[in-house]
Image: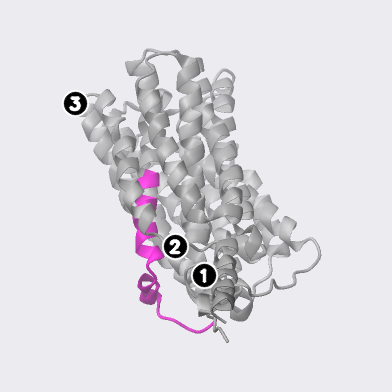
Amino acid sequence: MITLPPKVAAAAAPDIDRPKGYEWKAVTLMSLGLGLVGIDRFIIVPLMPVLQRDLNLDYQDLGIITGALAIAWGLSSLFTGNLSDRFGFKRVLVPALLAFSVIAGLSGLATGVGTLIIVRAAMGLAEGAFTPASIIATMDASPPKRHGLNVGIQQTMPALLGLGLAPIAVTQLLKVMDWPWIFLLVALPGVIIALLAHKVLRQPTAEESAVHSVTHDAGDHRWYEVFKYRNVPLAVLCQLFWLTCIIVVAALFPSYLVDYLKLPMDQMGFILSSMGFGGAIGALFLPALSDRIGRKPVMLLSALLAFAAFWTFLEAGANTTVLFLSLMVAMGCLYALLTLTVGPITAESVPAKLMATGTGMVIGIGEIFGGGLAPALAGYIAKNFGIEHAVTMPLWALGASVAVIILLKETAPIRLRAAPAAALAQGGNHD
């Protein structure tokens, strides 16, 4: 008789029942909520050249503003992930959603670099609390066989809305209104979604949450025990790499296109929209593919494709078609990598009562160093040595990421279910 390893047995654990329609309702609300996070965070990207002019900002200021939000986001995620595990994700994400929506509108009242840093940092605190809890809420609503698909749907929205539609909308709205009013437009939808989330979301028991983890562990754990699971520290490194790429692109690529390549604002907005459309496509299809062939193969393929796409972007000159397509591919792969890192790779690897803690740690540390310090460093390089040197940082980050991906442990249920079949086949040959 063959005894299956606990992780293999956990992969075959049955899905738990949910109220009819709960999966699509919860995934929709969490996707829209994270979409608003994307809008609130990245609406400032196409406004960077305008803010430079009106608020007398330089490249380093842009990096610091972007980094302040990321560092606050990271610090918040570090602590609120554990709160979500202790008190329930619903009690964390609903107030956080209300808070960041209102604070985002206050960005329009900024009068200089100091007030803009303060407001964006406060918004980062609220968004950092919402994000880990919302990812776990999405996974809770999903059967394990659709973790990649549904977290991918959720991660599609910040890319599509924040990076895809926002640059086009903002550059058009600037023709009819001043930039402070654009910030104020984003507050109301968040209030509505927060009220709907409060009504719809349910809080699972630890035993129900354990179905979503390969450990199948519903017991109590200290927060620091999350680092005993190898995928967590490796996922932290991965998240650092992905956010270095994404945030440096968001902070400096608009100015690179306008100041270095001498493209007009409308062409800049068009090229930046590829970030969102590519990110949405990548986050939707590649994590869903990982449900079928495994997390690691998809991550390795995505990292290599992103490296090649960024290389092409930096060699394209002012060719808008090549710039658009290469940036679309790069961001599609990066959003797939980010989705798999903060969702399945982390949450599937740890016990039920450490799922939000693990996700919060990965997001938090990644935001502080990849999202916070990297754009500040890139801004310093751009200011002192030229922006064309700063925009090469994504290539270095992606090159280093390949070794880390190889060390990850596979968590896809379909790959873990293949293990007992192989063991049984091998055992039958020996009988």
Q: Are marks 1 and 2 in contact (CB under 8 Å)?
A: yes
Q: Residues within 10 Å of mark 1 (few under 14, many from 20)?
A: many
Tell me the amino acid under the disc marked 3.
Phe
Q: Find out whether residue 237 is within the magenta segment.
A: yes
- Residue 12: percent from the left, percent from the top? 63, 73
- Residue 159: percent from the left, percent from the top? 55, 39
- First of labels 1, 2 by sequence position: 1
Which residue was labeled with disc 2? 360
> Could you tell me which residue is drawn at 49 percent across and 75 percent down?
351
Q: Secondary structure at mark 3?
A: helix
Query: Which one is in front, 44 or 105?
Result: 44
- First of labels 1, 3 by sequence position: 1
Which residue was labeled with disc 1? 84
Tell me the amino acid under the disc marked 1.
Ser
Vertical placement of residue 279 versus 402, above or below: above
- Residue 21: percent from the left, percent from the top? 79, 60
Q: Is residue 286 left or right of residue 251?
A: right
Q: CA–CA distance between discs 1 and 3?
A: 43 Å
Q: Nearer the viewer, mark 1 or mark 3?
A: 3
